[in-house]
Image: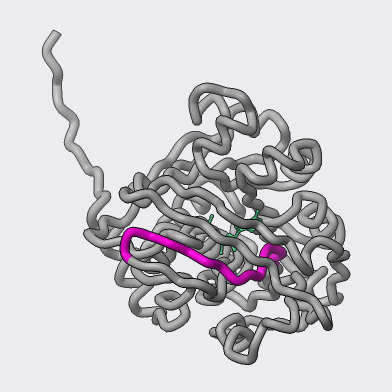
């Protein structure tokens, strides 16, 4: 299988209760690629500027990620985002979003990127996501993410893009904001009526829930006593989740397979938050991923014998 992703390639300035970074490698497609590279060959699509240095290319190329579709724009500046987290780390305020080279980007995918089996539209302008989606005719599974910034500034494009994919992965509050529904369940049902056959509601430190026509499945987040920087957790989750789907070959992509994929997403996200930016996942090993998935299986075991109730 092969996996293409379009999304932000960025520099981030981040402040958390545990420290700050003025400028670190980030971006939705970067975090996604690092996580998904455990499962398949990944091809990120997007532009970077002159400020994207050799060490940034090297991180992006971790575990064989192919950067042929990452376009260097001479004279340009890489996307920049600055954000700050609340004391409990579950709320975040955006201070700066500078699209820079993304503002005029017209995605033209190489034949190899167009012929992907699985496509992920990571967070970026919805019209760019749709432009890439329309070039990947062969993809048997297309998933996407977005965020409140695009719900506020490009809602129509976003709705059009959502209608073209198989699976929407979004924070629970953003699902409610997007649909105007008061509960995540009602919001997910609304999105399923638009066309996607699955919705994943990310719930921050509480985990994630899967909704499809075949039912519901939820996993808590991996229990961690210390979280240093949540930036990219959602993209790492998506990288583990979508990467697992890509690694299953021709197996039918049904509710059961997506539920299993949630465990890999949860494991990758949990490692991501242990350090700033890409630091932890860039040097993560396959054995560590497998160990955490095994832990999750053990911890969430739910195997009750039947009981006759009174009344
Ligand atoms: P996450 O924490 O998973 O929501 O993703 C954080 C990453 O998203 C950061 O590395 C940012 O560079 C990137 N990001 C922030 N705002 C945007 C935006 N409006 N569009 C695309 N990417 C963004």
* 198 vs 297: above or below: above
Q: Which is more toward the observer, 267 or 255?
A: 267
Ligand 1 quadrant assignment: bottom right
Toward which corner of the image does residue 137 lie, by quadrant?
bottom right
Q: Main secondary structure of the magenta part?
A: strand
User: Residue at 43% across / 62% down in the picture?
Assistant: 15
Quadrant in which the C terminus appears: top left
Q: Is residue 119 visible?
A: no
Residue 193: x and y in percent read 68, 29
Q: Report the side of 305 relative to 145 (left or right).
A: left
* 265 vs 200: above or below: below
User: Residue at 51% across / 57% down in the picture?
Assistant: 83
Residue 95: x and y in percent read 56, 53
User: Residue at 46% across / 49% down in the picture?
Assistant: 92
User: Residue at 50% across / 48% down in the picture?
Assistant: 93
* 80 vs 211: above or below: below
Quadrant in which the N terminus appears: bottom right
Q: Is residue 92 visible?
A: yes
Per the rendered image, the range of residues in magenta is 5-18
Residue 255: x and y in percent read 53, 45
| Residue 87 part of the magenta segment | no
């Amino acid at each position: 299988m092969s996996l293409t992703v379009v999304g932000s390639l960025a520099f981030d300035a981040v402040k958390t209760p545990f420290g700050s970074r003025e400028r670190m490698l980030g971006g939705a497609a970067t975090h996604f690629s690092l996580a998904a590279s455990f499962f398949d060959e990944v091809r990120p699509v997007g532009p970077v500027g002159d400020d994207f240095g050799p060490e940034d290319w090297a991180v992006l190329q971790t575990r064989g990620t192919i950067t042929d579709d990452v376009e260097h724009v001479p004279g340009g500046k890489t996307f920049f985002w600055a954000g700050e987290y609340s004391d409990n780390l579950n709320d975040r305020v955006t201070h700066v979003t500078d699209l820079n080279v993304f503002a005029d980007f017209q995605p033209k995918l190489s034949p190899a990127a167009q012929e992907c089996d699985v496509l992920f539209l990571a967070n970026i302008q919805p019209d760019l996501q749709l432009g890439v989606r329309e070039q990947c005719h062969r993809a048997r599974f297309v998933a996407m993410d977005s965020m409140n910034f695009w719900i506020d500034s490009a809602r129509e494009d976003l709705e059009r893009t959502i209608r073209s994919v198989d699976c929407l992965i979004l924070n629970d509050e953003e699902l409610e904001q997007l649909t105007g529904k008061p509960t995540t369940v009602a919001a997910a049902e609304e999105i399923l009526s638009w066309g996607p056959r699955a919705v994943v509601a990310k719930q921050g430190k509480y985990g994630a829930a899967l909704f499809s026509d075949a039912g519901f499945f939820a996993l808590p987040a991996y229990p961690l006593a210390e979280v240093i920087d949540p930036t990219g957790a959602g993209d790492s989750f998506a990288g583990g989740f979508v990467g697992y789907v890509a690694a299953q070959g021709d197996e039918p992509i049904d509710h059961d397979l997506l539920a299993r994929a949630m465990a890999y997403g949860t494991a990758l996200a949990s490692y991501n938050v242990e350090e700033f930016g890409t630091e932890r996942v860039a040097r993560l090993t396959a054995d560590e991923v497998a160990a955490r998935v095994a832990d999750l299986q053990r911890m969430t075991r739910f195997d009750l014998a039947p009981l006759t109730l009174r009344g």
